[in-house]
């Protein structure tokens, strides 16, 4: 076991992103000082945590010297290495082709930079984001700063590890099956997967038959997440969604909350169920109406349909690798999980159209559920955070896939429905690791989730990582 964090007596201190904005505007620190401190922190912890996919420290220093505008102007951050950023390679968590700098920003990068955040580079992820743990055989594992024997979750693993460890206060993440919420749960962070279409996306995500992926951020405080979406909406707004606006505290409305501790595939572990019920009791104490449901309202076939569609994405990448990533693409360098998903899709391709149709209809099922409830409470994951090696992608595919399905049993639903879902670190395991509780709501209702998050953050503050030393 090794506990790692980068917090110290420097310009960053223990400030969150909103605190850094205030410190810059009042002249207590400069953007250059914040960026320099973040670089030093990244260099200090990366040899252990392995969160960096690509660094652009010199560019960050140069940008810190000139205002770029935007609310977060001067606050250091990272991109996740599966969006295109001019001058940086996009390697998708693998080494299966030769890196080459992108010639232009993708749509998401242009939007993200408009907030004023200063990227120090890109963070690591599991190969193509397919696993809930980043443990690449050659790139190495991304480790949890609370205890480096454990995974930092995935696919936004580097982002989760670095925000939790105090390298930066906010980092880009995205979520196609839980990849914001899982690392939030593992690392003790706030992780909101927004509604489908809430933020602009790169071409690859937009072209999916069923758009599972939503971009967002990982933070240490509810106010940072709320501020990000407030500023995001000022830069780019999807008119088909209810606006979020400025959320600065708890809401007054008492909510109808459904509590579920059984997913389509399994019950949550006894400990995870206990933590969920304690969170439900807290909600009742706060005056919300809580109903305990026996199981999820989602049809049993959902798990198989989601796996098949997930596998079809791997198949498209494997088959189209040279066309997408260049002539240096070598499928022999892909891990067993990616290859196994490709094989699963190839063998079941005849079932894919019906699976996509059923997945597309789930939003109607969910809409009926939300006629009776405002919020759904579940654990974020079904079991405690696993140790490094439990989800080793070089192991037998069937073994790894079964373990992955059992662990991340609750998160994929909202990717299929396109609804917002938020993980908050409201509990702790016997091993001292954070545990996430997940709150989901109808499409467009991020404001409801953020107001509830403020209330829960005040009622049950989560301990900072420094307190675990």
Image (cartoon, rainbow, N blue to C red):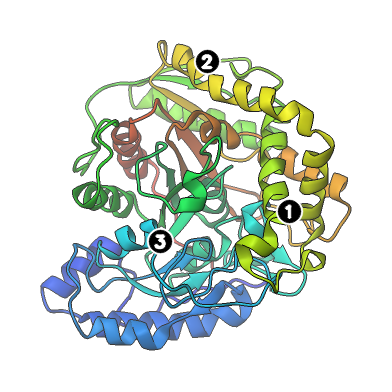
Q: Residue at x 36, y 44 (%)?
A: 457
Q: CA distance from mark 3 to mark 2?
A: 34 Å
Q: Residue at x 70, y 74 (%)?
A: 328
Q: Which mark is first along the chain, 1 or 2?
A: 1
What residue did someone put label 3 on? Answer: 106
Q: Residues within 10 Å of mark 1 (few under 14, many from 20)?
A: few
**Residue 122, image x, y percentages:** 49, 71
What residue did someone put label 2 on? Answer: 365
Q: Residue at x 17, y 67 (%)?
A: 22
Q: CA distance from mark 3 to mark 1?
A: 23 Å
Above/below status of 363 relative to 165: above
The reply, left or right, for residue 327 in relation to residue 222 is right
Above/below status of 210 relative to 253: below
What residue did someone put label 1 on? Answer: 319
The reply, left or right, for residue 120 in relation to residue 114 is right
* Residue sitting nearer the eye, 107 or 269: 107
Above/below status of 292 relative to 143: above
Q: Which mark is first along the chain, 1 or 3?
A: 3
Q: CA distance from mark 2 to mark 1?
A: 34 Å
């Amino acid at each position: 076991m090794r506990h790692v964090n980068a917090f110290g007596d420097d310009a960053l201190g223990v400030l969150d992103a909103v605190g850094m904005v205030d410190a810059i505007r009042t002249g207590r620190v400069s953007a250059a000082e914040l960026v320099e401190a973040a670089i030093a922190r990244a260099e200090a912890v990366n040899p252990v945590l392995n969160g960096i996919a690509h660094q652009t420290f010199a560019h960050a220093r140069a940008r810190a010297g000139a205002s770029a505008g935007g609310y977060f102007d001067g606050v250091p951050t990272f991109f996740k290495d599966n969006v295109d950023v001019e001058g940086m390679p996009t390697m998708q968590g693998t080494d299966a082709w030769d890196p080459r700098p992108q010639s232009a920003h993708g749509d998401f990068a242009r939007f993200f930079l408009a907030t004023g955040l200063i990227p120090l580079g890109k963070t690591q992820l599991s190969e193509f984001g397919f696993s809930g743990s980043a443990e690449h055989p050659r790139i190495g594992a991304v480790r949890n700063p609370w205890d480096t024997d454990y995974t930092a979750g995935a696919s936004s693993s580097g982002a989760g590890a670095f925000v939790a460890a105090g390298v930066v206060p906010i980092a880009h993440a995205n979520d196609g099956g839980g990849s914001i919420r899982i690392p939030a749960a593992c690392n003790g962070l706030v992780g909101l997967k927004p509604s489908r279409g809430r933020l602009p996306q790169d071409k690859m995500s937009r072209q999916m038959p069923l758009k599972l992926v939503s971009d967002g951020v990982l933070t240490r405080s509810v106010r940072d997440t709320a501020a990000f979406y407030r500023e995001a909406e000022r830069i780019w707004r999807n008119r088909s969604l209810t606006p979020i606006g400025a959320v600065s505290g708890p809401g007054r409305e008492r909510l109808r909350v459904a509590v579920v501790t059984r997913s389509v595939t399994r019950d949550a572990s006894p400990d995870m169920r206990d933590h969920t019920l304690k969170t439900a009791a807290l909600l009742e104490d706060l005056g919300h109406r809580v109903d305990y449901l026996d199981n999820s309202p989602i049809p049993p076939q959902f798990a198989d349909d989601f796996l098949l569609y997930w596998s079809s994405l791997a198949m498209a990448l494997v088959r189209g690798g040279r066309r997408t990533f260049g002539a240096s693409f070598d499928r022999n360098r892909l891990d067993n999980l990616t290859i196994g998903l490709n094989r699963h899709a190839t063998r079941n391709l005849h079932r894919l159209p019906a699976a996509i149709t059923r997945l597309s209809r789930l939003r109607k099922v969910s809409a009926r559920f939300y006629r009776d409830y405002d919020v759904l409470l579940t654990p974020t994951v079904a079991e405690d955070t696993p140790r490094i090696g439990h989800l080793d992608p070089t192991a037998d595919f069937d073994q790894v896939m079964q373990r992955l399905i059992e662990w991340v049993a609750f998160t994929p639903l909202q990717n299929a429905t396109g609804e917002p879902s938020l993980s908050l670190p409201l509990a702790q395991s016997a091993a001292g690791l954070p545990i996430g509780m997940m709150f989901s709501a109808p499409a467009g209702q991020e404001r409801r989730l953020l107001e509830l998050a403020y209330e829960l953050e005040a009622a049950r503050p989560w301990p900072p990582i420094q307190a675990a030393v």
